[in-house]
Image: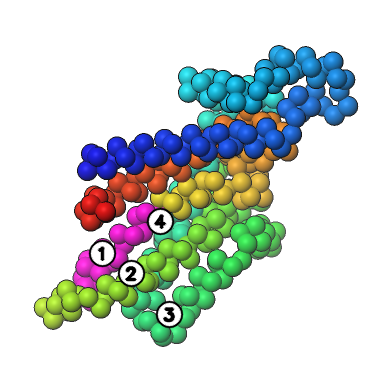
Amino acid sequence: MLGFIVKRLGLALLVALAVSAIAFFLLRLSGDIAVAIAGEGAQQADLDVIRKTYGLDRPLVVQYLDWLLKTLSGDFGTSIYFKTDVATLVFAKLPVTLILGVSSLAFALAISIPLGVLAAIYSNSWIDRLALAIAVFGQAMPNFFFALILVMLFSITLRWLPVSGSGSWLHYVMPTIALGYYTAPAFMRLIRAGMIEVLSADYIRTARAKGLSPYAVVITHALRNAAVPVVALTAVQLGFLLGGSVVIETIFALDGLGYLAYQSITYKDFPVMQVIVLLLSVVYVLLTLLADIANAWLDPRIRVS
């Protein structure tokens, strides 16, 4: 098990480094930082001074290595637009995105597990078709469009929930539903397929022959084994939710990392964008690593393979 963890940890570090390099070079190729700082129409002499001051006149590889060393030492630089320390700015927004990601994941699991179990128990019935229709609807409809429908219904028509902001838990209700509903179909289909396979297994027939209640057979024996693949998907989907919160946070003006990323792109604030991309990629890699370890612990065959 220790060897498995060391190999996965080494691979995770390589992936994080690759993502940081790709993000750095792509952001540099997307625009001139000196122009972003000085503004359009700046004099060439001013641009030369800015490039020399920020080290932008050096080769890109040297700039990347310098940025990487500073980042590893905890120096994330200064925001071009907000004129403040990037680390302070980013970590102040992180809790909002984490709350939104975790609550969206909880909402997705809360609706996908019952739907997946019911669809498997009543396979090929109207209940199964209804559950699949709900899943297809959630997957097919863009989450920004669903978010606008929620705003029109609960904020403008019924006036139950605030349209934007992040001052109270009410501000998280619609973003959570919009983001969670888009994620739920993947869980629902996986649980349904796993439950159908498990419910036809010999040990389930044995459990029924022993006179166990339907609840004990389905929840204690079937769902427990069918849920093993869900562990890996949960980690991946949480990473997707954190990274995919840009659109939802922007629509609801939720003051998290996604909204900060949108502002950074708008104002060409490269230092902030780099750190957000790096942070989200590292979180995604760590979640995938934890899922691999959990799966290897639950199923020893994975360690052998």
Q: Amino acid at mark 1?
A: Asn
User: As drawn, which residue projects farthest toward the bottom?
Assistant: 125
- As measured in the structure, the alpha-carbon distance from the residue carrying label 1 to the one carrying label 2 is 8 Å
Confirm or deny contact between disc 4 and disc 1 (CB under 8 A).
Answer: no
Kindly identify which residue carries mark 4. 233
Identify the secondary structure beneath mark 3: helix
Decide: few, some or many residues near mark 2? Use Cα within 10 Å; few <14, some 14-19, many ≥20.
many
Q: Amino acid at mark 3?
A: Asp
Of residues 77 and 59, the one drawn nearer to the viewer in this rendering? 59
Q: Earlier in the sequence, mark 4 or mark 2?
A: 2
Q: Main secondary structure of the magenta part?
A: helix
Kindly identify which residue carries mark 2. 194
Q: Amino acid at mark 2?
A: Gly
| Magenta stretch holds residue 222 | yes
Q: Can residue 263 be seen from the camera position used here?
A: no
- As measured in the structure, the alpha-carbon distance from the residue carrying label 3 to the one carrying label 2 is 14 Å
Confirm or deny contact between disc 1 and disc 2 (CB under 8 A).
Answer: yes
Kindly identify which residue carries mark 1. 225
Q: Amino acid at mark 4?
A: Leu
x and y percent of residue 68 in the render?
Answer: 53, 25
Left or right, 63 with respect to 286, comes to right
> Which dot, 1 or 3, sits closer to the camera?
1
Residue at 79% x, 27% y is 35
x and y percent of residue 252 in the render?
Answer: 64, 49
Left or right, 176 with respect to 220, comes to right
Left or right, 26 with respect to 281, comes to right
Please tell me the numbered disc located at residue 128: 3
- As measured in the structure, the alpha-carbon distance from the residue carrying label 1 to the one carrying label 3 is 21 Å
| Boundaries of the magenta span | 213-234
